[in-house]
Amino acid sequence: MLRINNLSKTYPNGVQALQDISLDISNGMFGLLGPNGAGKSTLMRTIATLQDADIGSIMFGDIDVFRQKQELRKVLGYLPQEFGVYPKVSAEEMLHYIARMKGISNNAERKELVKALLEQVNLYNHRNKYLGGYSGGMKQRFGIAQALIGDPKLIIVDEPTAGLDPAERLRFNNLLSEIGENIIVILSTHIVDDVSELCRDMAIIAGGKVVQRGNPEDLVKSLEHKVWSKRVEKSEVSKYQEDYKMVLAKLSGGTMVVYINSDTDPGNGFKSEKATLEDIYFSNII
């Protein structure tokens, strides 16, 4: 169990990145959903011992993360948002180097581990290729391979599918789902579909605060028969925003469609829509 209690962080420029964050996270895939600048990366870096909070605590089992950083790092796998690679080094060579850095000195053991990791992330046939020649998706899968060295009990992935094409995103999400069966995997992202497809538990963070928490399916059920849409002129959007609890306004088929939350039929030409996690997301960040 990962327990985050009353975590707050303000940067020297006055930006309050985290405001009294408290979360209990158990085994499985946990989605941390929020827009860019919401505080997700700050929270991930803090859990990963890369920066300190101003106040609050984090416990991972019996490990006090702020007082026992090295102990946490022994059981942590981390794939940051900006994951750089050495372009003139092969995947196999790089994994051997990282494994040695993590204390796996036995050559036979390390060779077996590297082979197994490359096969797990479907990169074994590209093991001798320079990392600089990898596609975005291949680099992300390599990132997961290096994060898995040392048999981690907690894995953090920060915006892992941003910029990937649909096929690579699917491969990466399937890999994450497989990994997250028996350990804690925290998926920090602004892509709603990734959380909807992968996670049984999630939180929405906005403005440095947790604004929603729960099972994605249960959250969507809470909006059943409460989402309504209507096509309007672009010039009318602001008026509808004033008159209704608007969730979202988007261009569709050349005209604007406004989506609102209402417990009862609002009339006025609105039609009922099936609720989605996207509705939950926009309801909490707007």
Image: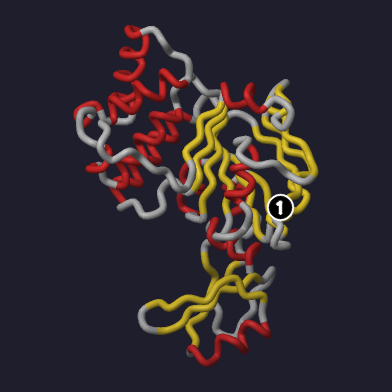
- Residue 217 in percent (x, y) is at 57, 47
Q: Secondary structure at mark 1?
A: strand
Looking at the picture, tell me which residue is in the foreground, 193 or 227. 193
Residue ID at (51%, 47%): 195
Residue 183, compared with residue 253, is above or below; it is above
Residue 125 appears in the rendering: yes
- Residue 14 in percent (x, y) is at 73, 62
Look at mark 1 in the image and give the residue it sits on. 18
The amino acid beneath tag 1 is Leu
Residue ID at (51%, 35%): 78
Residue 192, compared with residue 71, is above or below; it is below
On screen, residue 184 versus residue 66, left or right, reads left
Looking at the picture, tell me which residue is in the foreground, 230 or 110. 110
Q: Quadrant of residue 244?
A: bottom right
Residue ID at (30%, 52%): 165
- How would you rate the neighbour count of disc 1 (Cα within 10 Å): few for under 14, some for 14-19, many for 20 or more? many
Residue 166, compared with residue 281, is above or below; it is above
- Residue 193 in percent (x, y) is at 46, 52
Q: As drawn, which residue projects farthest toward the bottom?
A: 235
